[in-house]
Amino acid sequence: MTTPSDSSVQYNITDEQGFLVIHFAGEIDLHGSPHAREVILDCINQQRNTVIDLSDITYIDSSGIASLVEGYQLAKNKQLEFGLINISKPALSVLKLAHLDKVFPIHNSLSDRLQSS
Amino acid sequence: MDKTEIKDLLNLPIDGQLESHLALLAKMSQEFASSLDIDETLNNAIKQMMDYMDAEAASIFLLENNDSELVCRACAGPTKLIGLRLGAEQGIVGRSVQDNRVQMIRNVDEDPNFTAQVDEQTGFTTRSILCAPLVVKDIKIGAIELINKRSSDGLFAINDKHTLIALASSAALSIHSAAQAAALVEQQRIQRELELAREIQANLLPEPLGNDFPVHGLNLPMLEVSGDFYDFLVLDDDRILFNLADVSGKGINAALLMAKTSSLFHCLGKTINAPGQLLAMINNEICENTTRGMFVTLIGGIFDPHSRSITLANAGHHPPLMQHQNGRFEEIACGEMPPLGIIPNLEFPEYPLNLDQDSLYLYTDGVTEAYLDGEMLGEHGLQTLIAQHQGKPISERLKDIINSLQQDEQSLHDDVTMMIIEATTSPLLTESFPAESSKLKDIRNVMQTTLKQAGCSIEQTEGIVLAVSEAAANIIQHAYADCPDGRIDLVIHMNNNELTVVLRDYAAPIDISSVTPRALQEIRPGGLGTHFMQQLMDNLVYTVPTDGIGNRLEMRIKIQ
């Protein structure tokens, strides 16, 4: 896990079956979201299909959601795949609140994601 | 004094007449002493005197209307003169009173003061008159007049004169005593009625409630009745309607207008919960039928104990004083509208106010015009006095402040009335945080702990924590625009299962209209925070804090 300086969010990136999987842990709020955004956009800018693993996210706010939206839009522009997997309960309720649970491709795991495509 | 001396004094030549004379005096004195109906007693007495003195007619005239008139209060004989009014110097009776001398007129036709008018009206013929003044010490009361001696030559004799002097002295003393007794009875009646009025008026003031009730008032009348009043009543939705007022003038007039205004406020206030509208209606009612020149200065409002907000409306009363939590005083400007009862069809603007942890003092000018140590208290003195009693429970503080005003008998010159309004429940949390994104986690942690203690469900806690964290993030990002050294004050209250979260910053005022959520159909980053807050909380209100600095956001939610 990589921890940006003094951030409450941690992440690591794995390369699995043609996808970069960004695994975030902790809290993505106004303080952590710039780092999260940077990581997400960086992966997509590498012209890689990207999924975000939110299984260990204990808190996400509107700025965190905004980073996911930005990633989704950038991937779409680049005609790359983007999706969310393993969404924790707290993260899912916030996505629902933003009415984004039907916008993002959401799967329980990367293999589910691969099977569905 | 023996019998011979009395005989000599009264110049009574005929033996046996003294006994009957004394018997009449005794009877008259007894009747005067035993009856409070002075007219009945006088009529009995004049009949007895007429018979005793063997006159054809007799009457008693008393001075009335500041001694400007002589009015016949009792008479005996063929003509009824009761109610006849003469000038104080008119006729032989007038001369007798003014000169304080007995008048014995053997032939009235030769007397220039004789008024033939009465004879002309009644058909009675007056030939001779014996008239004695009624005097007690130097106080002129009136006169007794006897007309036409029946026996002998039809003329009154010198011994008649002396007898009448004796009878007049006794009658004067009795009339004077009876008048004084009647005045005393009247005075006692007025006193009893004033006491009753005071009791009725005291009943118009609300019963004081315990220290956990946020509105307390106290009235100290200078006279038996007061022109000041205050009132408060709890509405169905827990809000408290209150007023404090001062009627122009003093005494019964002011007390009656006080009763009317207070009743109107209490009655109409149950259905009209907007203070401005309420004042407008009361103003029109009072303008319609109130004695000219009388008016009422009244400040009224509604206090919401959940949001700790007040809406004020003011009709000519001087502005209330707010003591902030840090001890600083502020006079709350609330308009220049005239008092009630002067100009009809006025609109009274409303003034919103956030009370938070502050205290609002409403008072009549009797308070600031009190003299302590020879100097008028004034508004600055009042602030010092309030500060001296700071920290005491609300009802004790109010009593102590009013007691301090009663330094000595010269201290108060007017009715004194004061009201304190303050939120009486302590907040669940009061904390201040640096406005930095790295501190958002601290805010969330504190919220988690507080909400857990308040008995919130885990699910609701998550929602409230998100809403508050979003609000704080907005302050950091937009209000302070990431400037260093900003602060965010966080206060949480709980009243009747309703949670109120107040976030306050000290940044430049934000444009409230810019704080709107974006349409969710737009899939783009940003603008979601306000949407979250609105979705998660029951109510959001942005205001400018009472000290005019920064921004205040109040969020409310019912706890399940």
Image: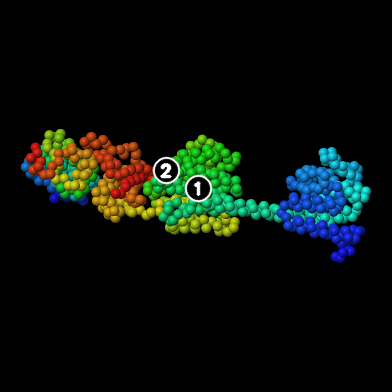
Residue under pointer 1: B244
Kindly report the distance in space between the C-alpha atoms of the residues bearing marks 2 and 1.
17 Å
Q: Quadrant of residue B165?
A: bottom right
Residue at left offset 59%, top offset 56%? B410
Left or right of B69? Residue A94 is left
Q: Is residue B337 above or below residue B560?
A: above
Q: Secondary structure at mark 2?
A: strand
Residue A113 appears in the figure: yes
**SS type, badge 1:** strand
Front one among B258 and B478: B258
Q: In the depicted view, which residue is nearer to us: B165 or B404?
A: B165
* Residue under label 2: B352
Tag 2: residue type? Answer: Pro
Q: Is residue B451 above or below residue B540?
A: below
Q: Position of residue B283 (x, y in %)?
A: 52, 39
Q: Is residue B482 visible?
A: no
Residue A40 % position (x, y) = 16, 42
Image height of B30 relative to B348, above or below: below
Residue B157 x %, y %: 91, 52
Total count of labels: 2
Q: Residue at x 68, y 55 (%)?
A: B184
Q: Marks 1 and 2: in contact by CB < 8 Å?
A: no
Chain name for mark 1: B
Q: Chain of mark 2?
A: B
Residue B450: % across, % down:
29, 54
Residue drawn at point x = 17 percent, y = 47 percent: A88
Residue that protrudes farthest toward the right in the picture: B153
Q: Which mark is residue A80?
A: none
In front: B454, or A43?
Answer: B454
The correct choice, above or below, for B170 with respect to B264 in the image is below
